[in-house]
Amino acid sequence: MLLQRTLTALLLAPLVIGLILLAPTWLFAPIVALAFLAAMWEWTRLSGLKAYPPRGALLAFTAALFVLCWLSRGTPWWPALIGAGVAWWIVVGQWLRHFAFGAAPTRENRLMKLGAGLLVIVPAWVAVVSIHGSGEYGHWWTLLALFIVWAADIGAYFSGSTFGGRKLAPTISPGKTWAGVYGAFAAGAAVAVGGGLLMGVGGGKLVGLLVLSLLTVVASIVGDLLESLMKRHAAVKDSGNLFPGHGGMLDRLDSVFAALPVFAAGKLLLGL
């Protein structure tokens, strides 16, 4: 499985990196929207919505929200939406403490989870488009944000596999350990500092970027755990089977969805 996951990642990574670095933001935004809509499609299934027509209608509604957000770019709505995304992940942290909340397959819980999907995906799209379009180095900042998440994921895997130890959230995701969390922090911080230095960030702003990387990693872990919670409620192993060894689109983007608003908000506050 590790070999399959590695080969898939090696095939996908150049495509993603090329898109980030080479595409103008007006082209980057709709392509990312398509990927996010694919994740939203999988989220509707995890939420308990089985019929295709209502799932398609929610997908169309999400696409319409993307269009409205794009039309409002450059207005105070964008930082407000990013802030709403950060606030949402703080709420999710409380949800994770109560595993059974929303687990029953009731209409009310299904609607709650569908609404949660919008809060997961729409602010993340606004955040990544905002970062990508933020001046001369916007493309590189976008890549750095993703590199922090990817490095944290790799660091968590190898640190957790090597040292094991106390479980992070055994009810939700038995494979995650606190050793993995520390490995994620170390890897994410190293990538953030290295990337910051390459882009000429120094002094207090570099320290701020280091702190931001740690908060971004925390958010990525919360995002991963939320999807694990959703899959356990739905009694499925993966959100889909789009990528061999990696599951569905949501399986690949769960950490990213949580990390992007936090990184975008921190970038704005630090003036980077």
Image (cartoon, rainbow, N blue to C red):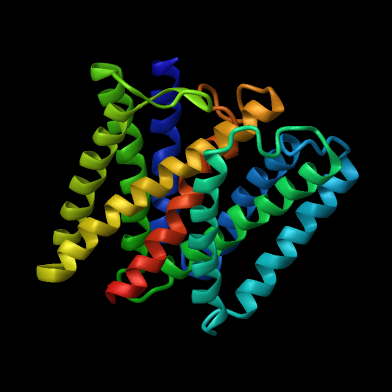
> 48 and 35: which one is in front?
48
Residue closest to the eye, 150 or 3: 150
Q: Position of 252 compared to 179: left or right?
A: right
Q: Position of residue 94 (x, y in %)?
A: 52, 47
Question: Where is residue 101 shown, x and y percent of the image?
Answer: 66, 38
Instruction: Report the quarter where the C terminus lies.
Output: bottom left
Looking at the image, residue 41 lies above or below residue 66: above
* Quarter of the image with the N terminus in it: top left
Residue 204 x/y as whole percent = 13, 70
The quadrant where residue 197 appears: bottom left
Q: Is residue 107 left or right of residue 38?
A: right
Residue at left offset 16%, top offset 62%? 207
* Left or right relative to 239: residue 64: right
Residue at 44% of width from left, 23% of height from top? 5
Q: Name, please, the residue furthest toward the bottom.
A: 75
For the point 76% across and 32% down, the residue is: 104
In the foreground, 85 or 4? 85
Q: Quadrant of residue 109?
A: top right
